[in-house]
Image (tube, rainbow, N blue to C red):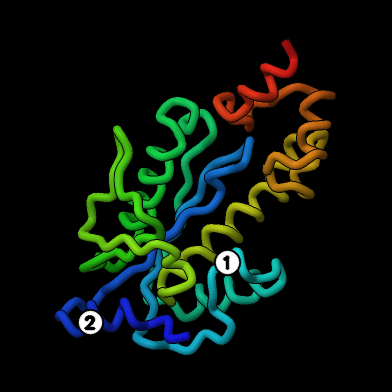
Amino acid sequence: MDLWVYERQQWQQGRTAVCGVDEAGAGPLAGPVYAAAVILPRETDIPGLNDSKKLTEKKREALFDMILEKAVSYSIARVEAAEIDEIDILNARMKAMQMAIDGLSVKPDLALIDGNRDHGSRCAVTTPHLTIVKGDGLSASIAAASILAKVSRDRYAAGELHEKYPQYAFDRHKGYGTKLHYQRLDQFGPCEAHRVTFLKKWRAGKL
C-alpha cells in the first residue's frame, strides 16, 4: 500500500509543507479529546506505519518515538472534558485539530484531515485542507498523526488520569465505556474527568 499518494499530489501542485491531522478519543466517557498534526520528510521510510487502530499498543509506542524523531514538525493538542460538554464533541474535535495545526513550528500549505468533517456549529478547520475518508489508512502523514494522538491520549488516561482517580481503573479501559468502567461508575459515580453529556444513558438507568 502506497501511503504517499495524497502527499505526492500536493507536492506536484507546488505545495511543500503538507501536514496530516487526526484525532483520538471522540468516544470515551471521560478525559479529553486529543488531536495531532504532523509534517513528515518527503517519502521517509517509517516501517509498519499504518492507521493506529490497526496496530498493537506495543507497535504504536515504538512508532510514536520514531515519528517524533523523523518529523519535520509535529504538534499535539487536546480539548478537556468540560469543554466537550460545553461545545459538543464534534466542535471539540474540530477545535483540537485546528489547535494542533496552529502548534506546528512549520506553517503547512495544506492539511490532510482524516474523515469527512471539517467543521461543527462553532469550530472549524480554517487552514486550507483536504478531507480524506479513512485517511489514517491511506496517507502516511495522517497515519502518523493518528498514532501521535492515540498514544498521547492513552498515556494520559493510563497515567495522569489513573493516578488522580485510581478508583475508576483508567489504566485498564482508558475512559471508554467498558463493562468495568460502568461498574466503577455505578460504585463511585462520575468524577470531574467524566463527560457529563456522555453519561445520559447511564444516568437514565439510575432513575
Looking at the figure, which quarter contains the C terminus?
top right
Residue drawn at (54%, 79%), measured in percent from left and top?
49
Q: Position of residue 23 (x, y in %)?
A: 47, 54
Q: Which residue is mark 1?
A: 52
| Residue 144 seen by the camera | no
Residue drawn at (64%, 50%), measured in percent from left and top?
156
Disc number at residue 155? none
User: For mark 2, does the 10 Å Cα neighbourhood hold few (<14), some (14 to 19), or many (20 or more) residues?
Assistant: few
Q: Position of residue 157 (x, y in %)?
A: 67, 47
Residue drawn at (70%, 47%), measured in percent from left and top?
174
User: For mark 1, does the 10 Å Cα neighbourhood hold few (<14), some (14 to 19), or many (20 or more) residues?
Assistant: many
Q: Position of residue 180 (x, y in %)?
A: 82, 39
Name the residue at the top extreme: 207
Q: Position of residue 166 (x, y in %)?
A: 80, 38
Q: Where is residue 106, by image quadrant?
A: bottom left
Counting residues from the N terminus, which is met first, the one under dot 1 or under dot 2? 2
Q: Amino acid at mark 1?
A: Ser
